[in-house]
Image (tube, rainbow, N blue to C red):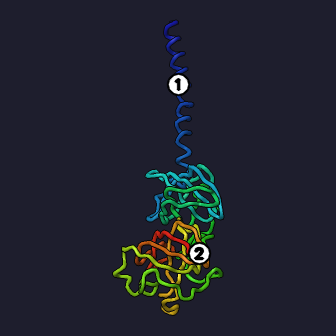
Amino acid sequence: MNSLLFRLAVATLALSLLPPLVGCSKSADEPAAENAALATPVPPGMVRGTVLETMNAGGYTYVFMDTGQDQRWVASMETPVQVGDVVQTDQGMAMSGFTSKTLNRTFNVVYFVGGLENLSGGSPAAPQAPGELPTGHPDISGGGAEATTAADIATYEEGKDIAYVYANKDALAGNEITLRGKVVKYNPGILGWNFVHIQDGSGDAATGDNDLIVTTQAETAVGETLVLNGTIVLDKDFGAGYSYPVLLEDASLTRE
């Protein structure tokens, strides 16, 4: 009898432990089930991930996100996010070796995106309109308050001026060339490059063959006369509507 009572007591005790165990298992599954941000498929052309690190600087939000496939830095117009949030964005434009002067930091690769959508309940900023760089980028096309003009500048090599480059662009594509020109516009620190417009007095503003855009890591200023050496590239597309038929890329420069 004592043995039977003992077995019944043990069985009762075991049964009394089952509800809490089942309850704990259900509770552990609840966060994922209740997170609608993770429940729907990622739309084509978009990426989604969890924020591992974030910071704001210069009107931008930088987010280090884990997509489940990789971990990447993305940058967009300033958006309220915090570590642990789930965010979604477009594929963006990858820029290698981008330096943020406001953060005093260089990213191996950062993706500039049109906007961040915070799926964890934050208030997303309005998405960037197609064909625009993220808010805060200066205009890198011609003109502008900082623009000036250049009078006749002696060519570095006889007969090879800016108008010559445009006229012979197909033959020059992929080749290095050295030019002398005056800086008529300068936009530093955009998409990992300093953008320089040079003129030498050749060409015609009406046809656009008087102004050559140069990308460089070196610094300069409007009004300086430079000797530049770089590679001619054609139809360079930086995305966001900024495409150039002719560009002098990754140029070194010497001031005169």
Q: Residue furthest left?
A: 171
User: Which residue sits at x=48%, y=61%?
Assistant: 96
Closest to the observer, 195 or 156: 156
Q: Nearer the viewer, residue 128 or 255?
A: 255
Q: Amino acid at mark 2?
A: Tyr
Q: Nearer the viewer, mark 2 or mark 1?
A: 2
The mark found on residue 186 in the picture is: 2
Q: Position of residue 110 (x, y in %)?
A: 51, 59
Is residue 110 or residue 180 the one in the foreground?
180
Residue 122 in sight here: no
Q: Is residue 161 left or right of residue 34?
A: left
Q: Is residue 232 above or below residue 159?
A: above
Picture coordinates of residue 194, whole percent (x, y): 55, 69
Q: Residue drawn 56% across and 49% down?
A: 52
In the image shown, does 161 or 129 lie closer to the viewer?
Answer: 161
Q: Residues within 10 Å of mark 2 (few under 14, many from 20)?
A: many
- Residue at left offset 52%, top offset 71%: 254
User: Label 1 crowding class (10 Å Cα cut-off): few <14, some 14-19, many 20+?
Assistant: few
Tell me if residue 234 comes above or below residue 126 in the rendering. below
Q: Is residue 164 visible?
A: yes
The residue identified by callout 1 is 15
Q: Earlier in the sequence, mark 2 or mark 1?
A: 1
Q: CA distance from mark 2 to mark 1?
A: 78 Å
Q: Helix or strand or loop: what does disc 1 sit on?
A: helix
Disc 2 on helix, strand or loop?
Answer: strand
